[in-house]
Image (cartoon, helix red, strand yellow):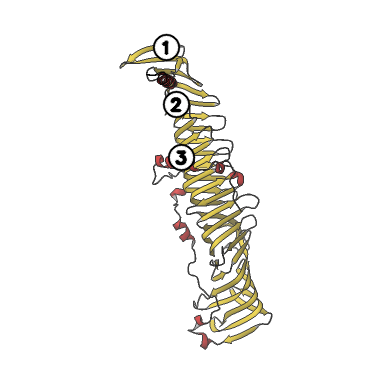
Amino acid sequence: MNFKNKIFFLLVLLCTANIFAQQQEYIVVNGDSLSGRTVNGESIREVFGHVVLTQGNVRITCDHAIQYISRNDAELIGNVIATQDTLTITTTHGFYYGNDRKAQSNSGVTLNDKKVILTADTGVYFFDQNRAEFNSNVKLVDTSSTLTSQTLIYYKDQGKTIAVGNVKIVESKNIIRADSLVHFRDSRITFADNHVRISSSANNSIIFGNHLEDYPEKFYTVVTKNPLFMQIDSSYIKISDTTNEEQKSDSLKIDTLIIKSEKMEAYRDTINIFKAEDSVRIVRGEFASRNDYTEYFRGKGEIVTKKISENSNQPVIWYENSQLTGDSVTIFLRENKIYMLDVDKSAFILSQNQKYENRFDQMSGTDIKIHFDDNGIRETDVFGGIHSIYYLYEENDPNGLTKSSSDSAKIIFSNKKVDEVKLFGSPTSEYHPENKVEGNELAFTLPGFTVYKNHPLKEELLSQNVFNKNELNENQNSIKNSSTKNLLKQQVDKLKQIPKQQTNGNNNFKK
């Protein structure tokens, strides 16, 4: 062996010896008294009273320890307290494995690192990696939120948490539930998957979905994969007492707004906007809509539906027996009630007679404004190139129709029926008698006349959702089809793929 080979060989021996020495750093156990014995050829030492175990910067105290010398392990019994820098772990009974530098307990464990307090029925902590893996009745508390789950991995240095199984984060005004979740302590950013539910006490709303990203410092949340939004509005209304007309009783009226789409976004800052896009369906009481894009300005009480491109379908609005279409439709709410609809550009409104289903009152124009009161539609104003068809009746018997045109129009309603039509600006009108109309009603239509049959229903939207009543229960077991191990692996893999700038609050998005 030449000189260079000898030097290389010696360096390899030194490095190997150093690694071996590090791996074989033996724990040191002291106490008030000790005794030793041999069991099945293994040397065991028991230490009693004011027991102190040390290994590097790890220090553990307890009442009683059983040290397995050759294995470099120890069983820890009674008032167990493990510390490392700012970290403190407490339990009543546990184990310390010196070669792996990890502590484990199945007897209830608490971790406190001055930033979070973490408790569980069982837990393992890896001191070299500053990583905790806790299971069963897990609870993590920090200054801004409380997280509970069945299984949790906590990365102390990075402030990252992966939770799986009946996961729940409670903040001041929001609660997030999911099957699995990744949370970043410093930025409070959260990524949640499967059976996701975020509820807000600020506006009495719930958003469901199968993937959620929440950025609290940006007041921004996005939900994808089968999202559904519910907002319950309630107000007191007066109902007459049946025994005495002079007496009135208070009754709570509850109305639920339901929105379903392919993607939902919420901006909870001063603007307070909720956005839904792609195959949007809306239901609230007798009001319903289908559209490509919806913006809900919750602070102002406005819902705006519109086309997303020139070639897109117009939004469709249904209210009672009326149907409206236009390039954009704005719904104005006051005290949780619709008081006006504004249909902008290429506006078209039709109303079907409930008794004669082939008879549709129709009106088209550039813009339509519909005003409501407690009894329904009060009046309608139409502007720009008006064309209309209205059926006439005498004592509820059909009596032909009128076709009209004008520059603008006003329609007055009474008892949910047209009471008066006023035409302004070069009006023209022609009458068609009943004998020309009967059986030939669908020949009397305006350009653009279409009856849409895909009216969304509340039961339909809820039945298509992936949640059932049991899953809405706070005590649900939310893992249905995936094992905890697989969910943990999925979230660990996702954590590796998340760009750093996305988790530190520097992500960019447009309103």
Rendered residue at 52%/59% (across/down): 278
Q: Can you tell which quarter of the image residue 342 is in?
A: bottom right
Residue 164 in view of the camera = no
The percent position of residue 183, horizontal first and vertical second, equals 52, 40
Q: Which mark is residue 102?
A: 2
Of residue 300 and residue 492, the one placed in the foreground of this image is 492
Q: In the depicted view, which residue is nearer to us: 332 or 209?
A: 209
State which tag comes first along the sequence, 3 or 2: 2
Name the residue type under label 1. Leu
What's under tag 2, amino acid-wise?
A: Lys
In this rendering, the answer to whether 19 lies above or below 447 is: above
Sequence-wise first label, 3 or 1: 1
Residue 10 left/right relative to 207: left
Q: CA distance from mark 1 to mark 2?
A: 24 Å
The residue pinned by badge 3 equals 492
Secondary element at tag 1: strand
Q: Position of residue 10 (x, y in %)?
A: 42, 18
In this view, the mark in front (3 or 2): 3
Mark 3 residue element: helix
Please indicate whether residue 7 sits to the left or right of residue 410 in the image: left
Q: Is residue 9 above or below residue 326?
A: above
Q: CA distance from mark 3 to mark 1?
A: 44 Å
Q: Crowdedness of circle 1 by 10 Å Cα count: few (<14), some, many (20+)?
A: some
Q: Marks 3 and 1: CB-CB under 8 Å? A: no
- Give the labeled residue for mark 1: 34
- How packed mark 2 is, by other alpha carbons closer than 10 Å (few <14, some 14-19, many 20 or more), is many
- Identify the residue shown where x is 50% and y is 56%: 262
Amino acid type indicated by mark 3: Val
Extreme residue toward the left, this view? 40
Q: Are marks 3 and 2 in contact (CB under 8 Å)?
A: no
